[in-house]
Image (tube, helix red, strand yellow):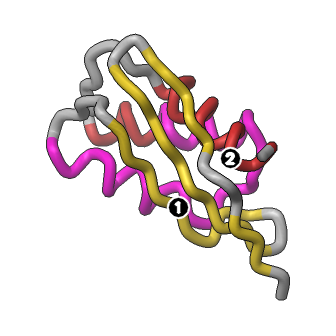
Amino acid sequence: MELLKTKPGIHKSRGGLIRSFVFIENGKIKDITISGDFFLFPEEAVFKILENLKGTPAKREDLLRNIEDTYAKENIQSPGTEPSDFTESIMKALEA
């Protein structure tokens, strides 16, 4: 049971800086934190994204689909920041 902690993945979207720290176990996200100076509405949206990412395979297409689905399900608004921006931050953490 290998647990891998990544370095921070930092991505600048039009809406602000996104910083991701990811813990991987068996090729899937075990735990993740996202911070930065972006805005998400409703306020608890980031927690919904983080919770839904747990257990997701650490692959770009799976991450993007998961975040897009969470945006739709939770009616998330994020001025200047798209699901692809969060995906990019996570991928940079995984590639670090």
Q: Position of residue 46 (x, y in %)?
A: 32, 48
Considering every residue shown, the one lying at the far bottom of the view is 1
Residue at the image position 45 percent from the left and 18 percent from the top: 13
Amino acid identity at mark 2: Ala
Amino acid identity at mark 1: Ile
Q: Position of residue 4 (x, y in %)?
A: 76, 71
Residue wearing tag 1: 32
Badge 1 element: strand
Dot 1: within a 10 Å radius of its alpha carbon, few (fewer than 14), some, or many (20 or more) residues? Answer: some
Residue 32, compared with residue 59, is above or below; it is: below
Q: CA distance from mark 1 to mark 2?
A: 10 Å
Query: Observer-nearest residue: 4 or 67?
Result: 4
Query: Observer-nearest residue: 66 or 18?
Result: 18
Residue at the image position 68 percent from the left and 46 percent from the top: 93
Q: Which mark is residue 93?
A: 2
Horizontal side, residue 35 vs residue 90: left or right: left
Give the prevailing secondary structure in the magenta stretch: helix
| Residue 27 occupies quadrant | bottom right
Instruction: Give, as a single range, the part of the protein colored magenta.
Output: 43-69
| Residue 81 occupies quadrant | top left
Mark 1–mark 2 CB contact (< 8 Å): no
Q: Is residue 65 visible?
A: no
Q: Position of residue 39 (x, y in %)?
A: 24, 30
Q: Position of residue 55 (x, y in %)?
A: 63, 66
Badge 2 element: helix
Question: Which quadrant is the N terminus positioned in?
Answer: bottom right
Query: Observer-nearest residue: 3 or 37?
Result: 37
Q: Magenta span has 45?
A: yes
Q: Magenta span has 76?
A: no
Residue at the image position 63 percent from the left and 71 percent from the top: 30
